[in-house]
Image (cartoon, grey):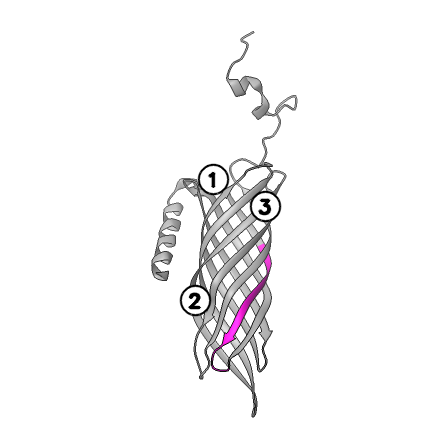
Amino acid sequence: MHRTLTAVLLLLVLLGLGNSKIWAISEISGSEGAMTADYAEEADSQSAQLSGNNRVLAYRSTKAISFLDLGLEWGTFAIEGKSTSQEAELSSDYVNLILGFSFRLFPSWLEYTLDLGYRLGVDRIKLDRTTTSGVNRHKIGGLSEEPFGRFGVRVLLGENLFVGLSTEQQQQLFSESKDGLSPEVTAGNTTFLTLGYRFGGQGYWRAPIKSGKSRSLDPCLLHRVCDPS
């Protein structure tokens, strides 16, 4: 199932790259977020909540395929926490493929985004395990492929700038076994603050013409009826 979803998203990205409109309206953004997740280790019956930071640099092409957006993101996160006898630290470097939908309702300076993503990551977990003989450190690595979802709201500033808040959820962050241990990190959740810039196409608002009247409010253009005199 995971491989199939990855193939579908990659195909959509390639189709979008072949579309001449992909460069028409695009945006770049940087995000930083507070991240939490649940840690469990079955062998020692340990559990804890991990927390830390998640950072993302993103490129997004709006309406690349019909009404759908395509995005590519590069990110890294590091979260840690303690249980009774273990201290866990999970870090990851990852790439996200995004298939999204962005829209505006009211007021016009608010924009909403709804994204389905697929994460390809290189994950590493460090475990400091306290036993009767002392503290033993274990390092376990692995590759991850997992889907996630994200919902966000943006405030449009001027012609091209925007700031936004979004929340992202991923069910499975890490699950590997080594040295008799089977650490698992699930229920990942990140709240992001985003700053971005949109380029190409038109700005967020129409520039006024001549006397200051907006072209979109000109009754002559609205109704396509003009007095020839």
Question: How many circles with numbers are drawn on the protein?
Answer: 3
Residue 192 in which image quadrant: bottom right
What distance separates the C-alpha of mark 3 from that of mark 1?
20 Å
Q: Earlier in the sequence, mark 3 or mark 1?
A: 1
- Magenta span of residues: 31-44
Identify which amino acid the numbered label 2 is placed on: Ser
Name the mark on residue 24.
1
9 horizontally vs 196: left or right: left
Q: Earlier in the sequence, mark 2 or mark 1?
A: 1
- Establish if 29 lies above or below 55: above
Identify the image quadrant of the N terminus: bottom left
Q: Earlier in the sequence, mark 3 or mark 2?
A: 2
- Establish if 226 lies above or below 25: above
Between marks 3 and 1 in the image, the one whose residue lies nearer the viewer: 3
Where residue 165 appears, as percent x and y from the top left, is: 59, 51
Q: Secondary structure at mark 1?
A: loop
Q: To which residue does mark 2 refer?
A: 144
Does residue 40 show up magenta in the picture?
Answer: yes
- Establish if 133 lies above or below 167: below
